[in-house]
Amino acid sequence: DAGAKKGQKVWVGIPQFAFSVPEPLLIDHYVKDTLTQMQKAGFTGDNIFMAAHSLGGVMTQWYQEDHPEILGSVLMGSTLLRSYHNLTDDGETFFRFPSPVLTLGGTKDGLMRVTRIAEAYYHAVQNIESSQKDMFPVVTVEGGSHMSFMSGVPPSAVLKSDLNPEISENDAHKFCAQQMVTFIGHILGNKSVVSDKNTKNFLAPLIEGMEMEGSYAIKPPCYDTSLVNRDSDPNADTDHHGTKLTLKLTWLELSQTRRSLSTIMTTSIVVHRNSSSLALVNNTCESSGKCTLESITVTENYYERLDSLDTGFYPISAYEMKTKMSARQNMHEHAGETDPDFSSLDEDGDRCADINNESLQWAISHSSKDAVKRYNKLGQQYVMGEDKGPYNDGPQWIWEYMSYKTSKDKKTVEIRSPMMRTPTSYFIGSAAGFHYCKVLSPFRVMEWIYVDSLLEFDGLKSSSSNSELFTQ
């Protein structure tokens, strides 16, 4: 109906797979058979488009690689795989795909998480190379879940992992149809293009979170032989914003010595077992007068291995940010303070937890009001536990990961960070004067707020009795 209103004569054929399960080796046969049946029914056109949902979207991409006659495709609850794009010398995204693609993603999809849709939007719309502008539009279905693209009884995998939709099935289908009609019309020569301001506004905070993390899905890390990053590199992340959070809070006490602190930060990769990249302080200030102290930190993001499958089902944010910093005592000494106390500066309290709480507050303040409201009502809350350690033999700190422990009532998740801390008088000189933390990524918090925190009490499988726990 939506196509007819725009003057399009749309024929729809649905391949009938055995047991309703798409089989990659047989997809060519089933597509040809469907076209044959449509032609027998009177279809005489040659403008062929494909549409697919979830895992079918991946198979559609594989099929189109060898079938350039397909003019375009629509992916619902799915997105173009990362393997199809790369960065140009200017740092823009270029897709190696034979035809245009429209991506439709629900903002409450538990299987194709909206953070993966945000990544797709960044590359396909925001950072796209100019020659491919409008070829790969990405649109969010506000309140849409994985089930919102379907009808009938949810399959077991969807029932288990999807979130509750906040849009009716009928409204979701109508919205998707309108986007499809515009997309097809544009490819066939109409001037109208798929452009949705609501999508841009909704995804902007998530993209900002990815940039704050220094997400490797946006740009690869700066693998450099120099400890200090190059001023700029369009093909690598040379400004690790997330490290600024650690310095903003952890070394704030330097203001008490009336010193101004500027920082030079590096995203040099930390090699797990034999890393020579260490935090350091570049200069020393006199005991009086103003001085700018230059420090270097080293950060490496660690991602869950299952994200490499690129299904959109697993978290795409960093599980932890391995961050090497100079100890506060070390900073105070270089700032000109005489005999600063290591115990009060570095041992008292939980410095890593303080940094993690800063990430939590940043994420909450930058997430949408609706997302935060939903998180506060139905989400499992992040809480910061005591730092773990100290693990003062470097390898032990490297291989001890951040812990995420769910409470018995499932309402909270406690986060604890491994840390290493050594005074400037430490008996191993090469390991003296450091304070290392496994840091919580601000984007990890945002992804938790928008998706993972909701699975327990706002999942499709959850009963009304679970939700009532939050109103007692």
Image (spheres, helix red, strand yellow):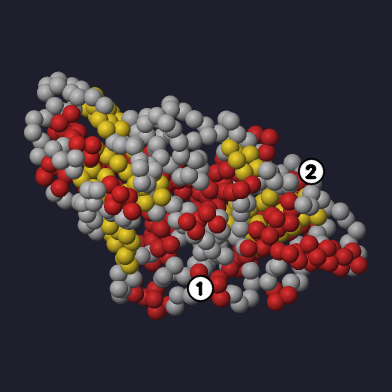
Vertical relation: 256 (above or below) 442: above
Q: Which labelled disc corresponds to residue 189?
A: 2
Q: Residue at x 88, y 56 (%)?
A: 45
Drawn side of residue 211 relative to residue 124, left or right: left
Query: Disc 2 vs disc 1: which is toward the camera?
Result: 1
Q: Which mark is residue 249?
A: none
Residue 306 location in percent, x, y? 49, 58
Spatial separation of the CA atoms under disc 2 and disc 1: 42 Å
Locate the C terminus by quadrant.
Answer: bottom left
| Rendered residue at 31%/55% (across/down) | 400
Q: Position of residue 290 (x, y in %)?
A: 18, 22
The amino acid sitting under disc 2 is: Gly
User: In the drawing, does residue 325 fall left or right of residue 64?
Assistant: left
Residue 160: mark: 1
The relative height of residue 264 versus residue 410 in the rendered view (above or below) is above
Q: Amino acid at mark 1?
A: Lys
The quarter of the rendered structure image containing the N terminus is bottom right
Q: Is residue 84 visible?
A: yes
**In this orientation, which residue lies closer to the viewer: 52 or 147?**
52
SS for tag 2?
Answer: loop
Local crowd size for mark 1, using a 10 Å CA cut-off: few (<14), some (14–19), many (≥20):
some
